[in-house]
Amino acid sequence: MKVVERYIMRRALTMFLAALAWTLAIVWTTQVLAKIDLVTDNGQSALTFFEVAALIIPSIIPIVVPFALVVAVAQTLSAMNTDSELAVLSAAGASRWTIARPILLLAAFACAFSFIVDNAIDPYARQKNRQLVAASRADLVSLIIQEGTFRKIDDGLYLQVGERLPGNRLGGIFVADSREEGASLTYYAKTGSIVEKGDEKVLMMNDGVINRKSATGDLSVIRFTSYAFDMSAFMSAANDITLLPKDRTTAYLLNPDPNDKMFQREPGSYRAELNERFAEWSYSLVFALIALAVAGDARSHREARINPLITAIAIALFVRWLGFFAAGKADKLWYYVYLLYGIPLIASAVSIWFIVSSRTMELPVSWADWLTGLAKRAGENWTTFKLWLARRTSGQGA
């Protein structure tokens, strides 16, 4: 590799790692916030929460890597053009291949990385994630024995224990059960205990009442000496782990179990997931070609055009949206599977044509004029608003 190629590779790689870190952090944070109920509702420790959060990372890497790459390549080449480095290389007789080779090597590395994560790491991380979530739900019976706190056991089922008594007994038990449609049950008991019968767990309540309120508003009260509240159904449901096609390994998707109930109900989703994994890795290469076609040539600063970074990201977003659209349809309509491969192939072919023909892929100049005018009007309106606000504030102060 030539000195100039190593220089381009170093700059692009540095920008790629920085963009990947920031993009990954933003997307990861939005996904992690959806899992915060493990701590708030299920009472799990912070360690379990962060373990689940860490297992989310492999699922977002294949999506984030191509966008980090297009940002890195477009920004690197745009900065080199601003510093007149691309013009110097062009005047020295360097071909586009000199610029493209280090970029394509970086794209090949990103493709291999995405493929390994998508097919070898992510399925196991998803399975482990589901096991942790199921274990946290199954452990709720021991977690509910905390004095003075409400615990959500299931949708529509809440329990509170007033105090813990000697001999593993509980005092002041309150249970609210609205899972049955058209009826609401409320249990009060002075004492109780958790009784284990093999794999079954039963909440035995003593000396209490049951209030039943129907949908029509009728209220009935039943007093009991002892009452067994069966929690085994909830426990068995919590222990059952349903694996979706995204949770399955690639080897399993290639040869699914005919007795798999999920496969029997939705065989198309398995086919769509397998083909999506085999096509998704290529977007790093596609986005690198798009960035090269947009920002890979020397351009004058006086030309009216949209910033190459914005152009590259806009085109990449459109291409990736088409890929997501095809993936969403492929489980129902089999012929959309061909689009999973056709979209990156067509986008690559178009980008290569622009590169080979020494043309620049860019949005229409009219769009640039429109965006410039929009930004100018927004700036003028913002200045007018600040003046109006200053006059209003000074008038109130007087």
Image (tube, rainbow, N blue to C red):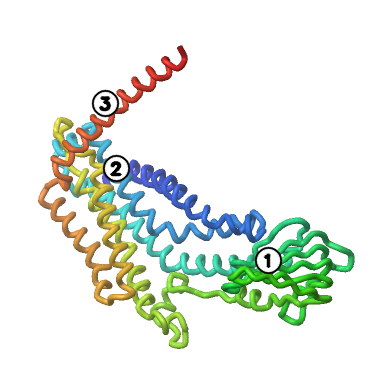
Q: Is residue 211 left or right of residue 391?
A: right
- Residue at the image point whose x is 76% and y is 59% from the top: 146
Crowding near pointer 1: few (<14 within 10 Å), some, many (20+)? some
Circles 3 and 1, Cβ within 8 Å, touching? The answer is: no
Point out the image quarter for the C terminus: top left
The type of residue carrying mark 1 is Ala
Give the x, y percent position of residue 22.
43, 45
From this viewpoint, is residue 38 visible?
yes
Which is closer to the viewer, label 3 or label 2? 3
Identify the disc placed on residue 380.
3
Instruction: Read off the residue under disc 1.
Output: 176
Q: What is the secondary structure assignment of the residue under circle 2?
A: helix
Give the x, y percent position of residue 117.
43, 63
From this viewpoint, is residue 3 visible?
no
N-terminal of the two: label 3 or label 1? Answer: 1
Give the x, y percent position of residue 262.
45, 80
Identify the disc placed on residue 8.
2
The type of residue carrying mark 2 is Ile
